[in-house]
Structures are given as C-alpha cells and as structure tokens.
Amino acid sequence: AQSVTQPDIHITVSEGASLELRCNYSYGATPYLFWYVQSPGQGLQLLLKYFSGDTLVQGIKGFEAEFKRSQSSFNLRKPSVHWSDAAEYFCAVGISSYKLIFGSGTRLLVRP
Amino acid sequence: NAGVMQNPRHLVRRRGQEARLRCSPMKGHSHVYWYRQLPEEGLKFMVYLQKENIIDESGMPKERFSAEFPKEGPSILRIQQVVRGDSAAYFCASSPPWDFSGNTIYFGEGSWLTVV
C-alpha cells in the first residue's frame, strides 16, 4: 500500500542552524514527491516538488530536497533556519494525477 | 489571478446541523479536489470533481457527506447531521484541465469546521 512516513513529529533547531526533515515513502512506481508548509491556521504552501530529472530539487525560501530512490526518501533541507520557518511541514507522494498521500507532518520549532 | 478561494474560513456547528463548505477554483481550473485534515494528522483525499461530474469519491465517508461542482458557481462540500468527529480542516484544491500529472495543483487556505 502507498504510504508516506515522517518519523519526526517535532523538531527544534536554533535560528541559523541547518535543518533536515525526513520523509520516506512506499510506492511501487516512480513517485511524484512534494513538500508543503503550513503555518498555524493557514493553508498549504508548496515548497518544492520532484517529478523527474535532477534528484536535487530547489524550492522557495531557500529549501531543497533530495530524492534517493535506493532509500525511498525525499528529505527536506535548509542550510540556515530563520525564525519565520517555524511551521508544520508535510511530505506527500502523488499516486495519480490528482491524489496525494500525505505524511502526518513534522512540526518545526525555532529557538532564538 | 486570485487563488483557490474557500469560505467560510471558520464554521461552528452544533451536532446534528448541516455544514456547507464552498470552494471557488482558480480561474481557468476545472478540476476540484477536497481533502480533510483531522487534528494532528496529514491531509487525506476525499473527492475529485470536474464540472457536473464526480470523478473519484473513494475517500468520502459513505454517509452524510456529499460534494458537487455545478456548471455555474463554486464547488460545495456538504456534511449533514454533523458529529464531533467531523471537526477538521477541509481543504479544497484545483488544477487546470490540461494537467494530467498533478503538476499544478493549488490548495486553498482551508475551512475549519468545529462541531460543538
């Protein structure tokens, strides 16, 4: 069955430190992969997506993610976190042209 | 170009009442999707609609929930006889008619339903 696992429910980092949020997926075919960010009480904003080609994907707000087929992973990274990055982050896999399977999210807290 | 518009943003209903959530897709988009986010969980697919057609409702609860996307006007997600377990954020998304890859799915800001 298709699934997305985000093993870290909460992550706390200091402002200026680097960040990596983990995402593992289970899907038989070549996946479409997404990272979304959700601020409290707000909707989803697409950070980046992977469809094909270069496995290192650049997104908005200085985020990047790397697709590793051998590990079934699509981890999100940022070299230097800002306080405004505090939010919930969702990884998703597209299993059809319209159906996304979301992970349960990772809440990022940023220490001043 | 306005994004996906959802209203109301927040809705409070007593148990047994009806909830109607509206979604206006982005201009030029003819595909609409509804997702539900229960507290502390990720979003889960509910239904996919095109104008006047339900394409896939495999994620919709079998009872009390219905969705439509009429020829004119917004898409409506209707929940009859709400129960506390329906309390959630309901997200609408849309994409253009030529998108068959999910490449251009845009989400609205969500409607938060609270059942008291």
Image: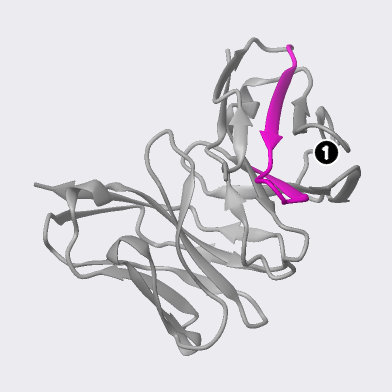
Query: Start and end of the magenta stretch?
Result: B17-35
Q: Quadrant of the N terminus of chain A?
A: bottom right
**Residue for badge 1:** B69
Q: Check the residue under mark 1 and report the chain it is in.
A: B
Determine whether A104 is above or below A1 in the image. Answer: above
Q: Residue at left 18%, top 54%?
A: A82
Describe residue B21's horizontal placement relative to residue A47 as left or right.
Answer: right
Is A12 left, or right, of B24 in this rendering? left
The crowding category of the residue bearing disc 1, from other C-alpha atoms within 10 Å (few below 14, some 14 to 19, many at least 20), is many
Say if B62 sits above or below A27 in the image: above
Q: Residue A18 at x, y = what percent?
A: 18, 67
In the displayed structure image, the side of residue A13 where residue B113 appears, left or right: right
Render colour scheme: one colour
Between residue B112 and residue A73, name the one nearer to us. Answer: B112
Image x and y of residue B105, in percent? 62, 57
Q: Name the residue: 75% across, 16% down.
A: B18
- Front residue of A56 and B27: B27
In-front residue for pair A97/A73: A97
Vertical placement of A107 versus B102: above or below? above
For the point 79% across and 21% down, which residue is it? B80
Magenta segment includes B2: no
Q: Position of residue B89 (x, y in %)?
A: 56, 34
Mark 1: which amino acid?
Phe
